[in-house]
Image (tube, rainbow, N blue to C red):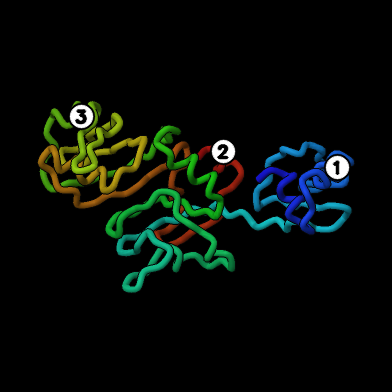
Amino acid sequence: MKLDRLIAKHGFLGRAEAHRRITAGRVRVDGRVVMDNQHEVDRFMQVEMDEEIVQQARRALYLMLHKPAGVVSATRDAEHVTVIDLIHDPDRGSLHIAGRLDRASTGLLLLTNDGRWSKRLMDAGSKVPKTYLVEVDADIPPDAVERFAAGMEFQPEGIITLPAELILLSPRQARVVLHEGRHHQIKRMFGRVGCLVTSLHRESIGGLSLPDDLAPGMWRALTTAEMAQV
């Protein structure tokens, strides 16, 4: 939201009066005087005018969770434990999931209440790599590497997946790097080469890897350095 719009809404001021007060240096954003009417503010910023709080800053949350199998990537579910149920934080109700994993899958999951951050992270145009360790029920055919790299057409969506990197680790185990997150994409791609996925574990998102000391079902806030890695 533009600063002038927020100030105008406060006390039912008109835009002209909001402009006057802002350019007079009467408005602070996060403790700093801002005189630009078009300055962008979000709900995580505190805005004051004449020492009166116009908007109280909300607490921004950026969390990582080691998702265990059997837990649903959802904010609520009538039948199953959700990832939100694992988070013990007073503001957990404000969280949403940045990149889901299905109920059987495990690994790194990110949760936040910052919609702009999660949108940038999950947007296919951002091409943030996501790495998965996958096990299947049959030997992976040699041409699978080329087929993953070429992209595959998904029906009924009528889309072609972005190139994916398939790294063979053993006849029935591989590492997959995606730059998007289509519905059941990895399972569907392996299905095209005659394999059924029996285990799927997300190891990393961007430069952020799941820490070895974060046990299944455990969570913690991202550090500043980890935010940069994502």
SS assignment at label 2: helix
Q: Is residue 193 above or below residue 50?
A: above
Name the residue rendered at 88%, 53% in the picture. 50
Residue at position x 46%, y 61% in the image: 218
SS for callout 3:
helix
**Quarter residue 94 falls in:** bottom right
Camera-side residue of 55 and 122: 55
Q: Which residue is mark 3?
A: 145
Residue 121 in the image: x percent, y percent?
47, 41
| Residue designated by label 1 | 20
Q: Quadrant of residue 10?
A: bottom right
The count of marks equals: 3
Which residue has dot 2 on it?
A: 228
* Residue 125: percent from left, percent from top: 42, 32
Q: Residue at x 26, y 43 (%)?
A: 185
Mark 1 vs mark 3: which is more N-terminal? 1
The mark found on residue 186 in the picture is none
Q: Residue at x 25, y 33 (%)?
A: 160
Q: Which is closer to the viewer, label 2 or label 1?
A: 1
In the image, 127 versus 48, the foreground residue is 48
Q: Earlier in the sequence, mark 2 or mark 1?
A: 1
Label 2, label 1: how far apart the Cα atoms are: 38 Å
Residue 209: percent from left, percent from top: 44, 43
Q: Earlier in the sequence, mark 2 or mark 3?
A: 3
Residue 164, given in percent of the width and then of the height, sits at 29, 32
State the separation of the CA atoms marked 2 and 3: 31 Å
* Marks 2 & 3, CB-CB < 8 Å contact: no
Q: Amino acid at mark 3?
A: Val
Q: Residue furthest bottom?
A: 78
As measured in the structure, the alpha-carbon distance from the residue carrying label 1 to the one carrying label 3 is 62 Å
